[in-house]
Amino acid sequence: MAYRTRLFTERTSNVSGMESIRLLRKDLVSWWTKDMYDSGIEAVPLGRRTFYHFARPEFMQHVLLEKSDHFVVSHIAKIMLGLAMGEGLLTSDKEQWRAQRRMAAPLFRKLTMDQYLPVMDQSALKSVMLLKGKLGQEQIMLPVMTATTLDVILDSIFGGIDVDRPMVAREVENYLKVMAVVGITDTLQIPRWILRPWRWRGYLAVWRLRRLVNQMLSSHRHNGANEEGLLSRMLAMKDPETGEGMPRRLIVDNIMTFVGAGHETTSVGLSWALYLLAEQPELQEKIAAEVSSVVSDEPLTMEAIEKLDLTRRFFMETMRLYPPVAAMVRSVETDVTISGIDLKKDDHVTLATLPMHRNPLYWPDPDAFDPDRFLPEEIKKRPRFSYLPFGGGPRICIGMEFTMLEAVTILARLVKAYRFLPTGKNPHPLVSVTTRPDNGVPLIVERR
């Protein structure tokens, strides 16, 4: 009998515009109505703008690909993320974004992933050690996964240069707690240069993090060390069309993007994965058997990783049910019609990934956990834009291959060493920038 999971209850009635904002501040999962999981369309007028929520593949394809020139990064996203990430890949638009993408894309191509695997493997082994001290006791998974993925991204960027990791972890957490909450001032499009005093902790966190990145960049330039780090490659990259390098301020913006967005989404995804492993002991043993057949105590290789097919499909199904990024947001720059709906300039569009991932039109028995949904023959049966844990179109996540390799590597090392058991304390998904488990996923960890 298939295991089913739905750790939330959708809203059953419509609410006013201001009540919508209150619910948005609480949790996006609480905001979406049952209709979002069926019809996939909802519109909320607010002032001169309409806030649309779409959860159907055809709308995703229009906004992200076919008519993407009519849309820009949402003003809400820029308020939430722009202070830290400036005009980097996640928050820029048009030619500025295209130039950065051209330069950075070679850093994350599938053929280059073997360069990052040793760092990922070492960090995964550290996570095994982090859990070792309290075997048989309840442990919270999210902080361990956060520390692990932060290690991966910092070592990948700086090539082993000593970084104050506890400070980075603390300030990223401070930033997300304060800046990732949508406020009325954000929804009403009050300019982001007008400071919100209640976010002082987030402003301070950004200042400290950007100062650290600038210090690391200056140190690297003066010392000329750590040629294997991602930073060295960023400093050397050139725009293939113009021959120009990336300006220092954009390098800082993108390091902040990789650190802030990259490790957070992966740690959240892994935490949900461990919860779902613990809830399905038979599947956990199948994955452990697959891992044991190809993973030894020797350093992991790409050849071994490629054989972990069930592990990879397990993580993909985890991201279907609890996508680390549950929604993407855009602002309408010029009037456009998509699937018969007229969108006006300055309207706001939320592409609701989580509800779409549970729509029975595309996912039979949508709450059932089934890694076989991601067998090649099953993937072909679904609309192209029905599964979007990494976005889609030209702006698809540049670190998609990096994240998948990292997640499979960490899961392999953890499952080889330990068995994960449930505590009966089920997490609730809280959606802001990412889909965090509200209790951090408490599990019992036993030696295998």
Image (spheres, rainbow, N blue to C red):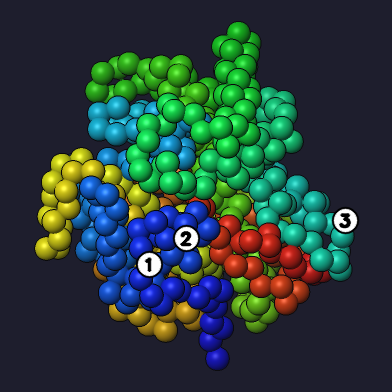
Which one is earlier in the sequence, the residue at label 1 or at label 2? 1
Q: Closer to the camera, 429 or 308?
A: 429
Question: In percent of the image, x 53 and y 58: which residue is there?
Answer: 26
The residue to which callout 1 is attached is 15
- Mark 2 falls on what kind of element? helix
Name the image quarter holding residue 199.
top right
Judging depth in this view, the residue of 160 and 198 nearest the camera is 198
Q: CA distance from mark 3 to mark 2?
A: 40 Å
Viewport quadrant of the C terminus: bottom right
Q: Is any part of residue 448 visible from this angle? A: yes
Residue 303 found in image quarter: bottom right
Mark found first going from the N terminus, 3 or 2:
2
Tell me the SS state at disc 1.
loop
Amino acid at pointer 3: Gly
User: Given the image, on which type of amino acid does mark 2 rest?
Assistant: Leu
Residue 255, horizontal then vertical, whole percent: 52, 30
Which mark, residue 133?
A: 3
Q: Earlier in the sequence, mark 1 or mark 3?
A: 1
Q: Residue at x 15, y 42 (%)?
A: 334
Spot occupied by residue 140 in the image (x, y as percentages of width and height): 75, 59
Judging depth in this view, the residue of 63 and 346 nearest the camera is: 346
Q: Percent position (x, y) of residue 289?
A: 66, 73
* Residue 295 in the image: above or below residue 240: below
User: What's the residue at 37%, 82% (across, down)?
Assistant: 364
Judging from the image, what secondary structure is the residue with disc 3 in?
loop
Residue type pointed to by label 1: Val
What residue did someone put label 2 on?
Answer: 23
Q: Quadrant of the N terminus?
A: bottom right
